[in-house]
Amino acid sequence: MLNKKSIEYLQSLVECHGGPGYEQDVQQLFRQRIKACCQRLDTDRLGSVVAVRNPKGSPRILLDAHADEIAFVVKHIDEQGFLHLAASGGWDAEVVVGQRVLVHGIEGPRPGVIGKKAIHLMDEAERSKKSQLDKLWVDLGARDGEQARQWVEIGDSVTMHAPFTRLLNNFATAKSFDNRAGLFVVSETLRGIKKTKAAVHGVSAVQEEIGLRGAVACAYLVEPDIAVAIDVTHANDQPDGDPRKVGDIKLGKGPVIVRGPNVCPTIFERLVKVAKKGKIPHQIAASGRGTGTDANVIQLSRGGVSTGLIGLPLRYMHNPCELLSLEDLESAVRLLVAFVESY
């Protein structure tokens, strides 16, 4: 069971706001959490943080999770005071409509809502169409464009405003478990390692949601022998779940150890071996190609990296109410600590 301090840290991570390129506040939380247990703490030129335990050890292991969340940036402020947005990451416009947001502007975050024409005012053709991001706007309550521009500038980041909430059966919901849950696992793994011969590099990577950008630079910088990326993955235990698409993945049954061409077979086998030895709950999933996670670019860095991938089962990905099992996070930490300590 995660202790109170760990839960409070997780809550601070998921309630923090950090879209791609705007991850600074998240990185500060990460640094504060792990600074006491690491011998080195660096920030690269893109803003990714690299925390190192046992820097002179061997082999060199990289544990990666990305810090950013899907977000928006302000593209235009019209004369009525409404903000028009550009997406940073893969949004489903249907889940965006009517959501509360924070606009991270000149004087700090300002609350707003995402607006759309009310259904009562739509004609029949409009009602039959899916929502489109370029037809939505943010309403700050501003009188006009002049007042809005006192608080907001072009390029300001906009993120969802949704609290961390505990649910039944040790489940929880929040806006950015993708991938603050993975970042939590990296933090707690770094803190939990007791003894290893390996040099362990914990990476909080930036800009994953717009092209795995931070991981490219970090993998080149660290030059690891071994890497494990930690990210969320789709659970299928919901009314429309289909195990033929994502595998038979359930919340509360443990982290997912991924197998396929994006994963080194020996790393996969070692993760499974330590999970079985430690009686750590885990699940297996397969991917027949590059996974769309940081593992994809880490594996290809320099002359190649022996890479593994851990997925944290998640419902409602890229949604303000992402949902997971806290027990899966605890099991993922146990798995990664055991993996690192096996060297």
Image (cartoon, rainbow, N blue to C red):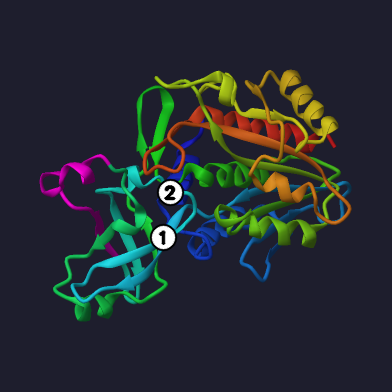
Q: Secondary structure at mark 1?
A: strand
Q: Is residue 75 left or right of residue 144?
A: right
Q: Secondary structure at mark 2?
A: loop
Say whether residue 335 is magenta: no
Residue drawn at x 46%, y 38% is 317
The C terminus - image quarter: top right
Spot occupied by residue 276 in the image (x, y as percentages of width and height): 73, 18
Farthest residue toward the front? Answer: 125
Spot occupied by residue 105 in the image (x, y as percentages of width and height): 35, 72
Residue type, mark 1 in image: Phe
Q: Are marks 2 and 1 in contact (CB under 8 Å)?
A: yes
| Viewer-nearest residue: 30 or 259 | 259
Where is residue 208, by image quadrant?
A: bottom right
Say whether residue 127 is magenta: yes
Spot occupied by residue 161 in the image (x, y as percentages of width and height): 32, 52
Q: How many marks?
A: 2
- For disc 1, the marked residue is 72
Residue drawn at x 43%, y 56% is 71
Numbered range of the magenta stretch? 110-128
- For disc 2, the marked residue is 91
Q: Is residue 18 above or below residue 331?
A: below
Categorize mark 2 by other alpha carbons within 10 Å: few (<14), some (14-19), many (20+): some
Q: Is residue 194 above or below residue 211?
A: above
